[in-house]
Amino acid sequence: MGILFSIPLFLIALFLLRFIYKVIWKPFRIQSAMRRQGINGPSYKLIHGSTKEAMFLKQQASKGPMELSSHDIFPRVHPNFYAWMKIYGRNFLTWNGPRPHMVISEPELAKEILSNKESMYPKIKIDGFAVKLVGDGLVMTEGEKWSKLRKIANHAFYAESLKEMFPVMVASVETMIGNWKKYEGKEVEVHHEFDLLTSEVIARTGFGSSYLEGQHIFAMLTRLGFLLFKNVDKVRVPDIIKGYKTKDDIESDEVEQSLRDSIVEILRKREDKVSKGDAQNFGNDFLGSLLAAHHAADKKNRISIDNIIDECKGFFLAGHETTGSLLTWIFLFLGIHTDWQEKARNEVFQVFGQENPKSEGLARLKIVSMIINETLRLYSPVTSLARRAKSDVRLGKYELPANMEISIPIIEFHRSQEIWGEDAHLFKPERFAEGVAKATRNNPMAFLPFGFGPRTCVGLNFASNEAKIALSMILQRFKFTLSPSYVHSPIILVTVRPQHGLPIILQPLDSMNA
């Protein structure tokens, strides 16, 4: 009887010891070690770390809209980083619950992390809502698995593949523009329109799927994204006690299962076509490349169904969110700066005339490229990059412990007055008139909208092509101005987006010339 009674006591004692080590002893030890190296930050609070302070700063920053006189969105979308940087310096320590998190905004240290080819700074280990949203695909995985998946993605996005996607992109934009005729002389909310456009493009080019299938998948990804960012600054019971589930956890489980079922159904349809002889292979698009790898004869190069599902999540999410965000903010700028809208339109007519864009002409759109780059600088879809120290490591003059999480706020580099000048917060596409290298004074950390180093976004040319096609075709047909009803409130929900949408006033080009 005594032995049976002592077992639960031993388990309780073991749990308490692990709790004390994880939540008290280890965080305070790391905090002391970093302070000795000159790295300070908000003091660690038991269990919560600095998340309560971060939540308060974010609530304060989002109370009202921003002025449009400046596009310095750093204090708006990362008010905690912005405030702590002013107090503690360019590098500081913060806490995600009991997990240490170092923010690094020194370009040389950021370059050392992002260009490291020895995998000393892999992606942060994700769990909970983040895993359900992006899975363990190319975006998050490491090592040999990453190399295998990157090879597949590179094949799907190489030059010839992008050419094959071109007609689909043009056709999708034509459909959207046809629907816009009902808005002529009226207000149209373009963020929603670009959401629909990019979801159709990614569904058709990457998966050969229908518009409705794509919309259903995006709706579920958007919901998971909302649940993730709703809980991002919370230290939740499931993080401390495994197995416990909140209402949001239960909902996210259901959404993820529905998402998985939808993707599996798309896979099944493609496999059925091959098994019935309706197709000779799985196809040359992204989904076809994944299925070919799944059925590969060489087991070493084979990938699982779970791998395919995670890749589909990442591809749908990144391909849709990035371009939709980019197009939205381009229209904000061109709706305000109609002189640049006219310059871009004149260039489009010089290159393509009245005809739809051709792939070989995109490289000649210099002014359009300048506008895209300046938009990416001021409203980069992704505002920070996250890594972790794989083991105890020396970074510059600092000694970092294993599993130290690291954030690189690229939004800070994009607004640096040291690099971009005193007008860094203003929209001035002429900065890029002589290319990115000249604009950044050959500082590779000054402009990071698609990342840097081995993990540079594989879909950057896809996103750029889609944005140029959509912008060119719209400029050929319409003029537009920003609606007086617009409320400037940028938020982060997967990517940077306007909280209340982006309404513009649309006018057909022929009526303006009449």
Image (cartoon, helix red, strand yellow):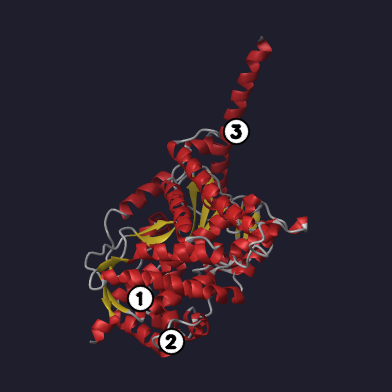
CA separation in Å, label 1 and label 3:
52 Å
Question: Reading the chain from its start, which is encountered first: label 2 or label 1?
Answer: 2
**Three-letter code, disc 2:** Phe
Image position, residue 314 (x, y; %): 54, 57
- Point out the frontmost of discs 1 and 3: 1
**Circle 2 SS class:** helix
Q: Can residue 90 be seen in this view?
A: no
Asked if 267 appears above or below 200 in the picture, the reply is above
**Three-letter code, disc 3:** Arg
Residue denoted by label 1: 427
Image position, residue 127 (x, y; %): 55, 46
Residue denoted by label 3: 18
461 or 93, which is in the foreground? 461
The reply, left or right, for residue 186 in relation to residue 341 is: left
Mark 2 crowd level (few <14, some 14–19, many ≥20, 10 Å Cα)? some
Mark 3 crowd level (few <14, some 14–19, many ≥20, 10 Å Cα)? few
The residue that appears at 64% across and 16% down in the rendered structure is 6
